[in-house]
Amino acid sequence: MFKLQPTFDLRRDVEADIRRKEAAVCRVKDYSGAVDILILNIERDGAILYSWKGSTGTTRVGKYDSSNKQNKLLYTFDKLVCVSSCSLNKEETLLAVSLAQNCHGDEHLKPMSKCLTLLIEIHPINNTKVLKAVDCRVKVQFLHPEGERRSVHESHLLLLTEDGYVDQYHVLLTRLEGYKVVLADPERLSKTAERVAEDFCWVQWDVRTQRLHFLTRADKFLLRCVQFYDNHNWETVLELPLELPTDAFRTVTFVNLGFDHHYVEKPERVKMEVLTKPLGSMCVCYSRPVCGKPELIYSVVFVHKDCSKTFRVTLGQPTRDAAQLQPLFIPIGFYVVVFLRAHFLHCLNIRQQELLCHSLFLSGDAADLGLSSKSGSFTVLHAEEESSAAVLDLASGTVHRVQLSPACLLQMLRSNSPPGSVSNMAAAQRLAALHCLLLYSGTAANVELEIIECLCDNVNVPNSYDQIQEFILASLYRKSDQRTLILDKLLPCSSVFDMKEVPACLMEIPGVLCNTRLHTESAFKGKAARLQGFWAELQWNTERTTYLDAEPDPRYRSSHVRAYWSKLMTEKPSSDTTHLLEDAKKVLAAVDAWHPDGKPVPLFQEEDPQQRLLIGLVRKRNPTTIGSNRAPMHDETVEKLREHLNTHLPRLGKKKIDTLVIKYVAKLLELIRNMLESLWLKHKLDPHVLRFSRPAGAGERAVFHFMLRILEATRGLCLPLPPGYHTLLATLALRCLPPHTFLQYVDQRFLRLTEPFVSRLMTDLDNGAANEKLKFSVLKRIPEAKPFYQMWEHPVTSACVSRDYVRNVLGRHDRSKELAFSGNDKAGFGTEFLPLTYLAKVLCEMEERAPNPFEEREKVDATFVEETALKQTLILLGFEGK
């Protein structure tokens, strides 16, 4: 289910180097003594701080630089001490350490009654200042500004204590002799302390984002979030009430886990995490076992979605070790992975959290993270990377980068057996795997193609949803502007939302109960003008979500354009729809610009007015009437998607929304073409597929069947198809189906007879009895078949063209003016049949008078009319065959 990549190994990256240094100190070839390496901290730049026991009875503190993979000795204590916490300022001139006093031997792992906090000058080695001497543990952490520091004359240090308060020390520095950086006034250091938080029962420091989250309790639990800025200022930005058990947190106890970004209570109590992403998403996760029952309750507060979900999972047999009931909360991309070893793995979708079928739940042997140690010995390193998370294995001292495995997710998609294991997945799990693949791994070039291959292979797998519809919407959603989370509420991301009644299998997870609560009552404390970056995005997302939750139907749905869609499918394009065709040109131009090279599937190579109108409909509105005798369109015909986004998301601006919508529709056409190209290449089809004379093979039949599924899926969603799609589909249908079945498909409107298809049919097929019958059947089903009569050299079509020509010419004849024949028999008319001869002379005279005798589409003349009439007469009299 996951891919693990080790990025740091204590033995490989640190211990080998330490032993070489100790061997040099002892002047031996190899040093075999115990070093007792303890990971202490990891700074914002990825530097790992650690301590070890030296060969001369000293304790040393070192740093591993992850960028150049080099180790550096920072400081040496002249005796054995127990370093429980450590931090280094950005300029590497100051080292803050917290020491557990009276510690000897292995007793340094036990809680001590006293703790000494020191501030040490290490460049150059000079003064040591005692900051605190208290009877509780203290965690130290320097603030690390994100940008380049203009001055190195100050550093800022946080002290977090088990007594429930946080202080910030403003350390002023000065230069001596041009290069030495020392404390400016050590005696006044304690007077610079500033109280940041107090009376908390839980606290978490996020070194990557320089944020402090802590929990206080008066009448109820209140989560407060403090942001530290690069100018060393800080402010409380967010307050969030939480519903926790009354005895969830009594006192704070910092556990010696070597390294821990978040400082939690003892593991047998409630576990809590705050997870954030830079685009303005924030999740508060907490869990607790149920006393006396083999169950686990965990909750996730989606602050950016203004809601929370509480899950109650049955675990089966209870476990003796309470720490086993503490899951890991791992942020990976737009998912929060809740993992409890040997029990379950739940990938919670933090963008589409409304339905359970968009989150992947695995249990038993399928719920494997791939880490060999017990889950209680892992610590998640908070990072805001989109594609992976870092997990520290405290038992082995290794850091793993955890990523979701596309191969495992593809295996779930290929499964078509009853649910039960990874190879036997339920429909809801396959749907969740599809979304997980596209939302998490969709940027990989081959993932989309592999999903298309899965859809082709599982074409007959029964599902509670349309797989192609789900793939199309999920792909388009992933390709939209992912930097705006509020689009999750506005764009269609799943066909499940369009169902009148969602099947129960998509709403439930066996063994899991879910309770959803809207409105989390989060309160932003920073002034609106001062909020910036992450907090501004989070506030915007929360406010817009609250607004959209009050709307009856905020998500754009295909039903918005269904009425106008039906009209465009049955009516001819008019001058009033010209702007729609212009917009379609922009969409098609965008697709062609992405793929300047030729493509194997013959699409986009013909004019298809209906599909171009449908393409334009998704973007523009038609404010005028269609035809002179029709009433104006009402609100259902206006530009739905563009107007929808402009109404609910004005922050993006009209220009950006216009660009977004054009790209959205262009991506749709590109996606459908990619699906056909995958089929085309898989079955090794060539341009000869468009010839009616060749019999259809297995490849053509497979492509035709899949194209029908695409047609059905896009019809249900009211989505346009690429120009040329209907021509290709009708061509394959004629080759793959018996003639009577083909005509039934046409009558049921599964197939549309396009002009290129009918033209090719008239010219490519001979006039055999079966083909003649088919051609007449096709022409009978076309409302205006006149242009196709001229393409087929057949007496009946010639007669139709002649009659239509005579009707049009005589209709323009002014009966008040008599015709005066010139006497010259230019046409060479005979006198054997006088009515026909007279008609031919009238037509010839009219042609000579007309300024443009061939202004009609039929390029015929009087001679053609006479010859056709004579030929038809001979056939009717039985003197000549057709």
Image (tube, grey):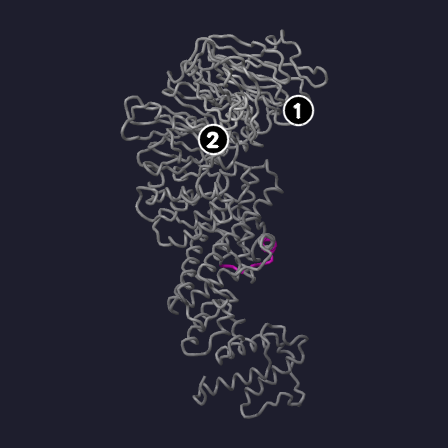
* Mark-to-mark CA distance, 1 and 2: 29 Å
- Secondary structure of residue under mark 2: strand
Using the rendered image of the protein, determine whether residue 136 is visible from the camera's viewpoint: yes
Other residues around mark 1 within 10 Å, as few (<14) / some (14–19) / many (≥20): some
Q: Quadrant of the N terminus?
A: top left
For the stretch drawn in magenta, what is the main secondary structure? helix
Q: Position of residue 306 (x, y in %)?
A: 47, 29
Q: Position of residue 59 (x, y in %)?
A: 51, 16
Picture quadrant of residue 604: bottom right
Q: Position of residue 852 (x, y in %)?
A: 66, 75
Task: Please give the name of the residue rendered at 43% of the width and 11% of the height, measured from the top-left corner.
Answer: 112
Using the rendered image of the protein, determine whether residue 197 is visible from the camera's viewpoint: no
**841 to the left or right of 734:** right
Q: Quadrant of the C terminus?
A: bottom left
Check residue 645 for magenta coloring.
no
- Secondary structure of residue under mark 1: loop
Among the two numbered marks 1 and 2 on one chain, the one whose residue lies closer to the N terminus: 1
Picture quadrant of residue 181: top right
**370 to the left or right of 224:** left
Q: Position of residue 340 (x, y in %)?
A: 36, 30
- State whether residue 471 is above or below residue 25: below
Residue type beneath disc 1: Arg
> Which mark identifies residue 149?
1
Other residues around mark 2 within 10 Å, as few (<14) / some (14–19) / many (≥20): many
Q: Which residues lie in the magenta part?
A: 570-584
In front: label 1 or label 2: 2
Q: Nearer the viewer, residue 697 or 55?
A: 55
Quickly name the residue at label 2.
Answer: 399
Q: Nearer the viewer, residue 809 or 449?
A: 449
- State whether residue 14 is above or below residue 837: above
